[in-house]
Image (tube, rainbow, N blue to C red):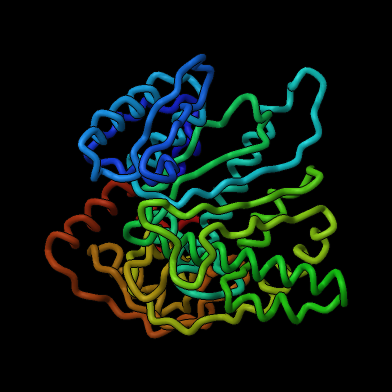
Amino acid sequence: MDRPWPQDDPAPLPVPRPDEVDPAVLGAPGAYARWTPPGRLSGTSLLVPESRDFPDSGDLLGEALMALSRSAAPSAREVLTGLAVPSDEIRWRREVPESPGGTSAWTAQERLRAAARDTLLAGALAARVRAGYYGARHRRAAEASLERVLTGPPGAESGGRELTVFVPVEEDGRVIAVTLLRALYALRDAADYHRTTGGMEAYDAAVAAGVSRELTEAVIALVQGTEGARVSLEWSPAAGSPQGFAARPDPVEFSPGDLPGLREAGARYVRDEPSVPVCLTGAVVRLRRTGPGGPGAVRLRVLSGAEVAQVRITLDEEDYRIAGHAHLVGLPIRVRGRLESRGGFRRLSGAGGVTPVQVDEAERDRLVKSLQENLDFFEEACGGGP
């Protein structure tokens, strides 16, 4: 996902209609409550109803929404975001020392948003399947599930210390938030156990709760260069808290003292994650060998059989010839082997049994067109060139 995250100059949010707004999001206790919109709105105070059961609830909510839309405060945008889509709110905070003139605020914000994005991605990966190390596996699906995540404004006054995102509760959003919270708690417990005993057993057990190399790397990036970091979560008021969770979950905190254990755990997860036997179907996108005969290297765009985008394969002379012919006529191939964890599950070892696969006419035309657009591969496919 290469789009700016969060956007430096976010587009204005549409103001929801009063009849679409849950008053609970504004946190009004009792039948009515006095509420002051965020920002410097001197003397502004609004009456907000507890529910829509009151005759004047629509008018009162409309006034509150209009005040929010006119507020220049970053927190006003956060409230509008929460009102627009029922979302769980995740907030990151890094305790970064103040620098002279505040020159590092932009750099700190960039580091924070990268760490936050990687944390969410680790939660999305764990929501699909548990693993100590994912590499390239499941990444496309995990990134796609985060497309609807909304980000709050960076907040210049925070000096790059805080970032808020809103994860819609619909579809996979609530599952990702729940999985991430469980994983962060398990990671905190494992870090405490390691600092107390020096043992890694708790890190090993934490994989079942969603902890992975990807999560340890995200937390390391979050904590590094700080005096400490915290992740907190608030459930959507409209959706309520999920079963088995507190209405206000405790924040999870990490400190620089946790870094050695996190690094050791991450390396352990990569080392211990086994290779996976697979039967892949993929389109050949590159062929290369050093002479007119012998084995050669092939790169496949994976169509089915594994949750990765591409793999590299070394094939013997006969299988390489079959792969080359299939490529030239616009057919994908099927191949068996073991998806290796080394290199991030991007290489197939022990590959063999290559066979062309019939596809429908539209897909074949598309593959042939791809071949025609990449004629520089033709010579390599025929065995010429380095």
Q: Nearer the viewer, residue 216 or 302?
A: 216
Instruction: Give the quadrant of residue 80.
Output: top left
How many marks can you see?
0
Residue at far top of view:
42
Q: Nearer the viewer, residue 214 or 299?
A: 214
| Residue 62 drawn at (x, y percent) | 28, 28
Q: Is residue 158 visible?
A: yes
| Residue 236 drawn at (x, y percent) | 42, 52
Q: Nearer the viewer, residue 143 or 386?
A: 143
Residue 139 vertical position relative to residue 165 in the rendered view, above or below: below
Residue 290 vertical position relative to residue 162 in the rendered view, above or below: below
Instruction: Give the quadrant of residue 215.
Output: bottom right
| Residue 283 drawn at (x, y percent) | 33, 65
Q: Residue at x 72, y 74 (%)?
A: 268
Residue at far left of view:
361
Q: Is residue 294 visible?
A: no
| 111 displayed left or right of 181 | right
| Residue 163 drawn at (x, y percent) | 58, 39
Residue 100 vertical position relative to residue 22 in the rendered view, above or below: above
Residue at far front of view:
31
Q: Residue at x 43, y 81 (%)?
A: 278
| 181 displayed left or right of 96 | left
Q: Residue at x 51, y 81 (%)?
A: 276
Instruction: Give the quadrant of residue 193.
Output: bottom right
